[in-house]
Image: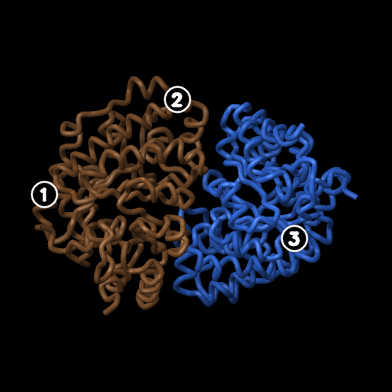
Chain colours: A blue, B brown
Amino acid sequence: MIKNDLFLRALQGETVERPPVWMMRQAGRYLPEFMALKEKYDFFTRCQTPELASEITVQPIRRYGMDAAILFSDILVIPQAMNIEVEMKAGVGPWLPDPIRTAADVEHRVIVPNIEETLGYVMDAIDMTKEKLNNQVPLIGFAGSPWTILCYCVQGQGSKNFDKAKAFCYTQPEAAHALLQKITDTTILYLKEKVKHGVNAVQVFDSWGGMLSPVDYQEFSWQYIQQIIDALKDEAPVIAFGKGCWFALDTMAKSGAAALGVDWTCSPEMARQLTGGNITLQGNFDPSRLLSPPATIKKMVKEMIDAFGKDKYIVNLGHGILPNIPIENAGAFIEAVKEYGS
Amino acid sequence: MIKNDLFLRALQGETVERPPVWMMRQAGRYLPEFMALKEKYDFFTRCQTPELASEITVQPIRRYGMDAAILFSDILVIPQAMNIEVEMKAGVGPWLPDPIRTAADVEHRVIVPNIEETLGYVMDAIDMTKEKLNNQVPLIGFAGSPWTILCYCVQGQGSKNFDKAKAFCYTQPEAAHALLQKITDTTILYLKEKVKHGVNAVQVFDSWGGMLSPVDYQEFSWQYIQQIIDALKDEAPVIAFGKGCWFALDTMAKSGAAALGVDWTCSPEMARQLTGGNITLQGNFDPSRLLSPPATIKKMVKEMIDAFGKDKYIVNLGHGILPNIPIENAGAFIEAVKEYGS
């Protein structure tokens, strides 16, 4: 049994003393203890070495005592396992030297892998993290949405508008759907294996869904996330987070997801309205607002909880924490939640 | 009198045979005739030389016969005129070697300029363009929103999240508001002068408004756009376009703007609902969707017009046209509108 089960109770919609809190990218570059490991080990070494990944996962819990841990990893371990080379280039970010551009690429180069063989290191990291957490707080596993993974596989790197990825979908829709289905199949196997190893919930990150029109979102992103939810929801609560996907919140609310992530451009009131008021929501503090003075942060967090309501709510940022956030500001964010109502 | 007044009639909410059409960045890099001038003259030379700016403005009208021209220029001529150095760096884009970072910078370095002295070349370009257009179609003048201009002035270049600009606002709000007010004052003088020289409508581009929460948007962006609308609306119709600003459409609809721009993440139905159904809307084709085959483009444009309704509507993209759009695809977009209903 997990000692602090606030997060799991919020996912089930139960009444709680205060809402739980965690932060997207809480195991990240704003932490000096993370930077110390980053200086010694490159990105994929940190992901692929269970001792390092588990240590990084528990760092923020030790410092701040969030109500949930999220396994340190990267959404791009999936294309790596699917036989697509992915590097992390200094100053560039993700870099795929040989992107997917044709139906033949999808058919011949991309595989649905054996998870144990290709991503066993993630499962080892989960095992080791569970030991370190010692049932203090739940552990979240995650994956990118198939659309977001496709964006990188086709574009070959980060982009302002992922024009090459969108062109691929709009000029070769059959190849795009074949790729999305392979990513979906792999993601389902991957998340199920994570649940077997003890993650208590899974989150699907659709970082680039908000670049699509509502119609294209249904076609190229949402239907695949729905497949993942259908396959996982009886095994673990699923959180669906689509950055900029306010326009799909009504559909998402009927999906069987346990909770929906919301970004800061959607007010708490509007988020409740668009989702029908009955599903647990997670979010939505503007990560840049953690640059405000700590007293302002605390005031804004309290207002945010008041606006969402303390139940069916998980306090979080609206996207990942930025590397330049002072550690005391991140602390003020967590403290404000713990002090809520007292 | 303007011969083709479809655009002006749509701005007034009149019943029209078919909606008017133009494209944001229609005078741009997808056009071979634009590229020919780009190879010979650098960016600010093209902006500052009335012969070139007017020629570039009419290029797309000659090729496609849109229902409105928009003066070729750049939103960053405003900070230039305000004594902030702006360069256009190859491969980087806008580059401000000495960004604004302190209250002292705002007070001592930033001026509200004499428009004729600093931006007379824009007025000359308008005069020359009006001659070339010979009253065939209306001419649109534009400016960036004060918030969007602040983003560049403080960040010093383009950015994924404009974290330095946001940090400036959140840690030094008084300095931010002083800067926003100076930009607003300059923009009002600038747009009024444009109207004097004969532009038939003005558009305010809030390209980065969608990075703010609804509350921060009101504080740091909208209140200044509202000042601009108040100052201009009796002299020319004002179009307000905030990329990603769906959450403010209800406020915008009550502002006195003649029309509101909408991006492609907001469905036509939702845009009509959020704005109350009574104001002219402009948009919202996904610029990447112009990568689709021409037949698909035509089908999608027809569906878009059906969804918005032909009245109180100006067909446009949801943001600027991309440089890699084939010219026949841009042509299909324009043709589909002209063929609508026939």
Picture quarter with the C terminus of chain B: bottom left
Q: Quadrant of the N terminus of chain B?
A: bottom left
Q: Which residue is rendered at x = 38% and y = 34% of the image?
A: B153
Where is residue B120? Give x, y as percent.
16, 37
Single out the residue that lies furthest toward the right.
Answer: A1
Q: Disc 3 marks which residue?
A: A119
Q: Nearer the viewer, residue A286 or B40?
A: A286
Q: Is residue A44 visible?
A: yes
Q: CA distance from mark 1 to mark 2?
A: 41 Å
Q: Is residue A49 above or below residue B304?
A: above
Seen from the viewer's position, the closer of residues B288 and A83 is B288
- First in sequence: mark 1 vs mark 2: 1
Q: Position of residue A112 (x, y in %)?
A: 68, 71
Q: Quadrant of residue A326?
A: top right
Element under disc 1: helix
Res. A42 visible in picture: no
Q: Position of residue B316 (x, y in %)?
A: 33, 61
**Mark 2 = which residue?**
B174
Label 3 to label 2, Cα distance in Å? 51 Å
At label 3, counting other C-alpha atoms closer than 10 Å, the crowd grade (few under 14, some 14-19, many 20 or more) is some
Amino acid at dot 1: Met
Say above or below: A74 vs B171. Answer: below
Same-chain status of marks 1 and 2: yes
Q: Which residue is mark 1?
A: B128
